[in-house]
Amino acid sequence: MILKAYELANWIEKPPDDPRERFFIRPTPDLPHLRESGAASIDLRLGTWFVTLPRTRFTHLDVLNELDPASADAARLAKTHYVPFHKKFYLHPKDFVLAVTLEWLRLPNKLAGYVVGRSSWGRRGLIIATAAGVHPGFTGCLTLELSNVGDVPIALVPGITICQVFFHQVESTSAKTDRSSFLGSRKPGVGTIKRDPVALRLAELPKP
């Protein structure tokens, strides 16, 4: 069941005694406004860090080659940009950039979430995607994948509302937390692509 905004506000304002069940968002949202909004999500703002994959740096991305740390194309050739709050980052048509939320989150073990873009941005050609699920125990800023599918450049201003997160409770007694490679991150990252054991064995089969 998705939690209403007023329930999330209560969770933030009066955290449980158990440290594993405390829910933090920093900077803290306007809790009175959150209670009165009637919403079922919390808005998050755009941070100051962006990561691009410049076309001039490589001819293509070889996903399989990224399994070799010495030739991890995307991670090695990505370019990080810092944009102050009073500046703008221009996302041109057909371009793609990794961004990060201004807010830092810490989810308790019994809370999970998923991120969606705001329709007001989508109507302007900005598609906001992410690893949709935010696992229980996640700590850090959320990485967002932004694409301009429109015909004109879009000026992105750090600090502006960019996405919303829906939260729901998880029925679990496990003390384990999310062990993602992005745990605790404050900047966007390309990440790695892994092949499971079955895929590795298939790759070793002789060609017919």
Image (cartoon, helix red, strand yellow):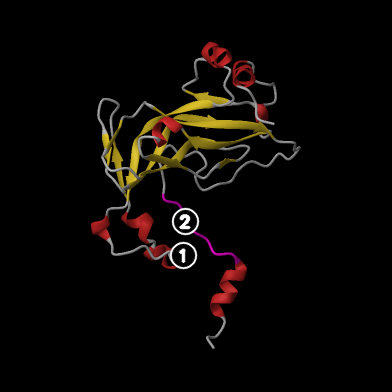
Judge by depth and name the residue closer to the eye, 93 or 53.
93
Q: Is residue 107 visible?
A: no
Quadrant location of the C terminus in the rendered image: bottom right
Q: Nearer the viewer, residue 37 or 98?
A: 37
**Is residue 43 rendered to the left or right of residue 46?**
right
The kind of secondary structure element at disc 1 is helix
Q: Is residue 76 above or below residue 67?
A: above
Residue 167, picture quadrant:
top right
- Magenta-colored stretch includes residue 194: yes
| Residue 180: percent from left, percent from top | 55, 47
- Disc number at residue 192? 2
Where is the N terminus found, in terms of image quarters? top right
Up the image or down, 114 lies above or below 197; here it is above
Quadrant housing residue 91: top left
Tag 1: amino acid: Leu
State left or right for residue 188 relative to residue 90: right
The chief SS type of the magenta part is loop
Q: Determine if the magenta segment contains residue 92.
A: no
Q: Type of residue at label 2?
A: Thr
Residue drawn at the location 34% of the way across and 57% of the way down = 76
Q: Which residues are magenta?
A: 190-196
Q: Quadrant of residue 137?
A: top right
| Residue 67, numbered circle | 1
Q: How many marks?
A: 2
Q: Residues within 10 Å of mark 1 (few under 14, many from 20)?
A: some
Element under disc 2: loop
